[in-house]
């Protein structure tokens, strides 16, 4: 199963298309999807979005106009397909659901990509079910920092929240944004850092603070979640998460791998190979909330269930 970490979205088997106007985009897109969905009776999604490019002249508004124009064409030509279009639900794709994408690179040039239902399992580490691979998390002014958005975004991508019955270890926790989010969900947290968390979090009865080196901490029993957003060299973070997974110290994991520059990106390939050979159900992805970093998240092989989808 391929895994692309540094792209917002992938368009498998992309076909280049040129269109001079919104109406041309709509007509060509409608004809293209009608051809692919002619015999399909189940649900499907259409995502029209901007493909990042330095010279791009396309706007999100133009994408919305194209998508609405396609919907209008289908309402006239093929009402059955118009009714089965999944326009609002952002949860995991159904087993019989198509994902059709229109990536607009400029106002007049872009790509079409169709992913049939049987192909989704093999592409789920590359193709996001969110338009353009973008997930925007609402602000939370009570959080110690904006870093909480990474963990909140992982929940959305997994279609699974941290739960009140679960236990978490948060390595490098200070000032406490990830601990804050886990506590907000009702989970219990062991926070490990050389510096204390924000004062109100330190008073939380479901939080245990351990002052020390996050990379030397070992749990006394298996916990539900390993959380780690610590600032460290990629090799050090990777080695630590590999130890946690090999020792079976957690069931789920969410770890930020932070880079100093592009030269560090090469360290992701052996990580992906090792996780795959060990049978862990993982995702490795640059999230909307990430900067020069990627998020490793998923479920360990010991649990035996899948971790959802991007």
Image (tube, grey):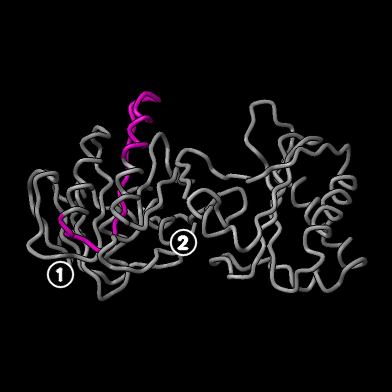
Kindly check if marks 2 and 1 are in contact, taking CB atoms under 8 A apart as contact: no
Q: Is residue 47 left or right of residue 255?
A: right
- Which residue corresponds to the image point at 22% horizontal and 62% vertical from the top-left? 168
The image shows residue 186 at horizontal and vertical percentages of: 28, 72
Q: Is 253 within the magenta?
A: yes
The image shows residue 295 at horizontal and vertical percentages of: 37, 46
**Region of the chain picked out in magenta, as a range:** 247-270
Disc 2 packing (10 Å; few <14; some 14–19; many ≥20): some
Residue under numbered circle 1: 205
Nearer to me, 149 or 43: 43
Give the number of marks.
2
Nearer to me, 49 or 240: 240
The image shows residue 130 at horizontal and vertical percentages of: 58, 55
- Which residue corresponds to the image point at 41% horizontal and 56% vertical from the top-left? 154
Residue under numbered circle 2: 156
Identify the residue at the far right of this view. 76
Callout 2: SS: helix
């Amino acid at each position: 199963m391929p895994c692309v970490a540094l792209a917002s979205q992938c368009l498998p088997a992309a076909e280049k298309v040129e269109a001079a106007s919104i109406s041309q985009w709509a007509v060509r897109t409608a004809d293209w999807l009608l051809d692919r969905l002619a015999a399909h009776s189940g649900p499907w999604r259409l995502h029209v979005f901007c493909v990042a490019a330095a010279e791009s002249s396309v706007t999100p508004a133009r994408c919305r106009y194209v998508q609405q124009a396609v919907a209008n064409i289908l309402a006239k030509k093929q009402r059955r397909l118009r009714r089965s279009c999944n326009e609002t639900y952002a949860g995991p794709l159904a087993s019989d659901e198509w994902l059709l994408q229109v990536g607009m690179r400029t106002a007049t040039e872009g790509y079409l990509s169709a992913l049939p239902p049987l192909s989704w399992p093999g592409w789920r580490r590359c193709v996001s079910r969110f338009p353009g691979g973008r997930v925007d998390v609402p602000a939370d002014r009570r959080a110690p920092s904006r870093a909480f958005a990474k963990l909140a975004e992982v929940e959305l991508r997994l279609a699974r929240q941290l739960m009140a019955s679960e236990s978490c270890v948060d390595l490098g926790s200070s000032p406490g944004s990830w601990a804050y989010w886990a506590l907000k969900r009702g989970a219990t947290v062991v926070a490990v850092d050389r510096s204390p968390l924000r004062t109100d979090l330190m008073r939380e009865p479901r939080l245990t603070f351990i002052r020390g080196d996050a990379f030397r901490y070992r749990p006394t029993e298996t916990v539900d979640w390993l959380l780690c957003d610590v600032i460290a060299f990629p090799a050090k973070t990777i080695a630590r998460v590999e130890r946690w997974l090999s020792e079976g110290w957690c069931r789920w994991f969410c770890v930020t791998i932070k880079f100093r520059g592009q030269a560090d990106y090469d360290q992701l390939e052996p990580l992906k190979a090792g996780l795959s050979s060990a049978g862990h159900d993982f995702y490795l992805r640059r999230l909307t909330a990430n900067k020069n970093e990627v998020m490793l998240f998923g479920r360990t092989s010991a649990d035996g269930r899948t971790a959802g989808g991007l």
